Image: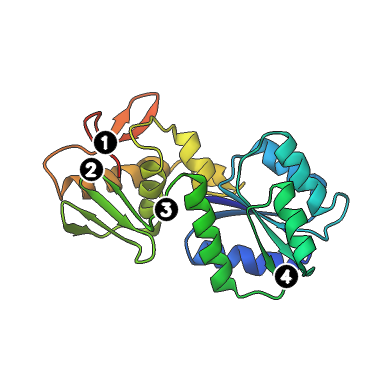
Amino acid sequence: MRVLVVEDEIRLAQNIAAAFREGPGYAVDVCHDGEEALLHCETAAYDLVLLDLMIPKLRGENVLRELRDRNEKTPVLILTAVTGAQSTIELLNLGADDYMTKPFDVGELIARARALIRRGKGIKSTVLQMGCIRLSLPEQTVSVSGQVVDLSPTEFRILEYLIHHPRTVISKRDLLEHLYDFTWEHHSNVIEAHVSNLRRKLRSATDSTILETLRGRGYRLGSLNDNPA
């Protein structure tokens, strides 16, 4: 998953980014003003935007309004020091998906972020399943046909992203852009190794090839006969 943090308090932005990278293992980009936020959203596909209201150049409300005017459906979680029912109503009417008032608990922020990402992808459960693969987000575990498979953090994130896109051909660039931040070019030479290791581990728990490589096109999880749940 890839998250954009829009926050002008540099230390707070860094702390939020670190929490998402070290906790759920998301790729995180950070910017500090509204104009930069819109530029980021034009150049990258995000699974969630964490948006402060009191930011320079273009306030958070205007960033949110512009995103929704573009028909951008990425979930937006507002971070604000403003409280009150009227403020909440205004934010929701503008298209915010959730909000948290400062100061906030980082653990709760991550939990809400995960919920919004699942909702944005039409997934209500914290357990993802496709065919014989079962992936638990809270436990960070994977099993295939009931057999636990030990994955590295990057392999887990690749599998999570592929399950969110069942039977869809995902290019290497798509994986890189959702697994890493804007320094992803430095990781491009290792993505094949991660996918190869993931395929080997999945294959060890079943006789069939679950993760396919389509030469020159990308990767696909599951055959056409699999039913995602």
The residue lying furthest to the top in this view is 216
In three-dimensional space, the C-alpha distance between marks 3 and 2, rounded to whole angstroms, equals 18 Å
Can you give x and y, in whole percent of width and height, for residue 221 in the image?
31, 37
Q: Which residue is drawn at 61% across and 75% down?
A: 105
In three-dimensional space, the C-alpha distance between marks 4 and 1, rounded to whole angstroms, equals 42 Å
Q: Mark 3 points at which residue?
A: 124
Which of 210 and 131 lies nearest the eye of the viewer?
A: 131
Q: Mark 1 points at which residue?
A: 222
112 sits to left or right of 50? left
Mark 3 vs mark 4: which is more N-terminal? 4
- Disc 4 or disc 1, which is closer to the eye? 1
Can you give x and y, in whole percent of width and height, for residue 219 in the image?
35, 33
Residue type pointed to by label 1: Gly
The secondary element bearing badge 2 is classed as loop
Mark 3 vs mark 2: which is more N-terminal? 3
Q: Which residue is drawn at 77% across and 70% down?
A: 83
* Viewer can see residue 33: no
In three-dimensional space, the C-alpha distance between marks 2 and 4, rounded to whole angstroms, equals 43 Å
Local crowd at mark 4 within 10 Å, few (<14), some, or many (≥20)? few
Which of 123 and 141 lies nearest the eye of the viewer?
A: 123
Residue type pointed to by label 3: Lys
Can you give x and y, in whole percent of width and height, for residue 113 in the image?
55, 59
Q: Which residue is drawn at 55% across and 45% down?
A: 184
